[in-house]
Image (cartoon, rainbow, N blue to C red):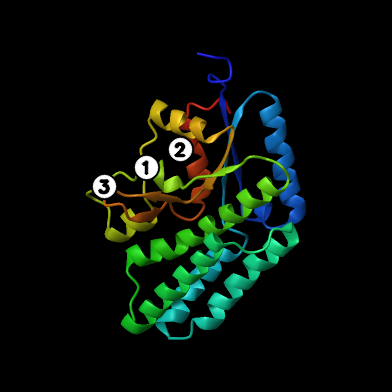
Amino acid sequence: MTERAAAPWIVLKFGGTSVSSLANWKNIAAVAKRRQQEGARVLIVHSAVSGITDRLERLLAAALAGEHEAAIAAIEARHLQLCDELGIGNSPRLAGYFTELRQIAQGVSLMREVSERTRARVMANGELMATEIGSRYLASVGMKAQWWDAREGLFAIEREAASTRGNYLSATCDFTPDPVLAGKLAGLGDLVITQGFIASNPAGDTVLLGRGGSDTSGAYFAAKLSASR
């Protein structure tokens, strides 16, 4: 095994405020680059842009009342504002998340109900949109950051005693050290960016780790990767 192949993982977790401005993204880039220069592989785990999780909650409430267009427009505008600040513009993937939110909101408006499965899927978009933006910013400053879907690495444990709401919105995941996952991520490169807060269940549905779950995600990934820090 080469020295590079054996490079340790360091997990860097950033909250919503930390990913909401150019100044803070410059700091993230500097911290990640420093850790790479020290010889580590870096996994960045971060939250949705500050305030977006609450806006997604309000979007669902507005959709129940058939008044979701303004809520979606505000979510789009905030992300496009950040893209402009970072100098990266929109992208097909980001636009796809906007489209998905609009389609789900329209469905909620027609059905006049929100299942826990739907709520988890909508709320997950905050982290998915934010990391999509973050990965493109890091690439724009010359860092080879590979975007990766956390739902491919964090898997919820079925809890028979838990309610449907608990299983979808406050899931618990396995965090046993996983050499296969470590190898998969290493194959993506030395710098990987992924989402906090979200995971998948045995049925392949999106689940959430509860409010503040990005901290939990960071800890889960550190354990699964046997990270040094």
Along the line of sight, which residue is nearer the eye, 131 or 16? 131
Q: Amino acid at mark 2?
A: Tyr
The residue that label 1 is drawn on is 173
User: How far from the left and from the top, in percent, is residue 13?
Assistant: 59, 42
Q: Amino acid at mark 1?
A: Cys
SS state under label 1: loop
Along the line of sight, which residue is nearer the eye, 152 or 164? 152
The reply to whether residue 177 is visible in this rendering is no
Q: Between tags 3 and 2, which lies in front?
A: 2
Q: Is residue 60 left or right of residue 76?
A: left
Furthest-front residue in this view: 92
- Distance from the alpha carbon under mark 1 to that under mark 3: 10 Å
SS state under label 3: loop
Mark 1 touches mark 2? (CB < 8 Å): yes
User: How far from the left and from the top, in percent, is residue 180?
Assistant: 39, 29
- Distance from the alpha carbon under mark 1 to that under mark 2: 8 Å
Q: What residue is shown at x 72% (from left), y 31% (from top)? A: 34
Sequence-wise, the earlier of marks 1 and 2 is 1
Marker count (numbered)? 3
Above or below residue 29? Residue 116 is: below
Q: Between tags 1 and 3, which lies in front?
A: 1
Where, by quadrant of the figure, is residue 190 drawn? Answer: top right
Looking at the rendering, in which quadrant would you find the C terminus?
A: top right
User: How far from the left and from the top, in percent, is residue 137?
Assistant: 68, 51
The residue that label 2 is drawn on is 220
Per the rendering, the mark at residue 90 is none
